[in-house]
Image (spheres, rainbow, N blue to C red):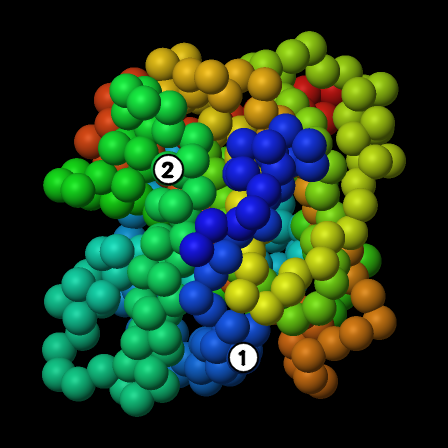
Amino acid sequence: MKHPIPVRQQLQEQAYANVPIDISKADMHTAIEQYTDYLTLDESYHAASRFLLGNRGDGDYGQFTREIGKETLRGKAQDNKDIFHFGSMSRQVIESRISGRLPKAMQTFLNSAEELFWSAERSKRDAVAELDVAGSGLLKIMQPETAMLNDVLRFIAYYPGADTLAKGHFDRSTATLALGESHEGLRMTPGQNARAREVNKAYMQELQDSLEPVTHHDGEAKFFLGAGWNRLQPEYRKSNENLQLAWHDVVSSDQTVNDKIARWAIVLFANPNRDHAGYEAPSTTETRPYKSFN
């Protein structure tokens, strides 16, 4: 089922498109509960989930813990959270590394993650198909039939300790599907990065000042473009040159999930397939242009 307003039109007007998903908030809440059960397992079961596909700057999978101020592969962490990156190869890699039966908590979480991943992929495919002008080849590189898919379904459990849970940024992905969140906190506004226009401190402040809260509705996700969109060759963006990226952040609120988790979210990050030549993930100054002024 398509949204009555075309994806392209929604991206032009507000930088994100409301698209249907076959995933309810209840489904996501259950998956997060299963994820937190998985987190209680021994570190060996976390380490077994981590792997990297290639070296182009994306494709990191598995369980990661972030603590404010500590260095990560992407710089210092800005908040306290656990994240899990699930992909099309995750089950195969994990089961090949763990001999014998997986712990029940791990098996249950992976079952849910796999179901949500492929359901999200169907929604992403429909959204991308609306941007695939005849002959552009966009859908082929974003939803390949034979090449290796390189999309990431991220489960996020935020913990108390930071006023801003995610500072303003453009996503590293080519496109993003924000499936849902425990409660409001995501804010968005149309914008562009250094690969599409000249940016300066004034422009970045303008973006930050224009952020507006978005509301998730059951059975509907937010589809938007990341900095990776401007990394695609022009032929794949044919007739879509005027589409905005989504500058966004996540702020905390008085609401919490329970006495341990402040907030949760589930997001799909979509990237060109592993066999797509000539693509590199965006740099930090493309996803966070303000860093070039610091």
Quadrant location, the C terminus: top right
- Residue depicted at 54% across the width and 66% down the height: 219
Q: Residue at x 80, y 45 (%)?
A: 212
- Front residue of 146/78: it is 146
Which residue is tagged 1? 26
Residue 58 visible in rendering: no
Q: Based on the displayed image, in which of its 4 quarters is residue 208 positioned?
A: top right
Structural crowding at the residue carrying mark 2, measured as other residues with C-alpha within 10 Å and reported as few (<14), some (14–19) or many (≥20): some
Instruction: Report helix, strand or loop for mark 1.
Output: helix
Q: Quadrant of the N terminus?
A: bottom left
Give amino acid for label 1.
Answer: Ala
Q: Residue furthest top?
A: 198
Judged by depth in the image, the label closer to the viewer, 1 or 2, is 2
Q: Measured from the top left, where is residue 180 in percent x and y?
A: 58, 63
For the residues labelled 1 and 2, say whether their Cβ atoms are less than 8 Å apart.
no
Q: How many labels does the image show?
A: 2
Percent x, y of residue 29 = 54, 78
Residue identified by numbered label 2? 129
The location of residue 235, given as percent across then percent down, is 36, 14
Q: Earlier in the sequence, mark 1 or mark 2?
A: 1
21 relative to 70, above or below: below
Q: In 3D space, how far apart are the residues under numbered discs 1 and 2 (Cα atoms)?
A: 28 Å
Q: Give the label on residue 6, or none.
A: none
Residue located 47% across and 61% down the image: 21
Q: Please, is residue 87 above or below residue 10 in the view?
A: below
Q: Residues within 10 Å of mark 1 (few under 14, many from 20)?
A: few
Give whichever of 101, 44 is nearer the camera. Answer: 101
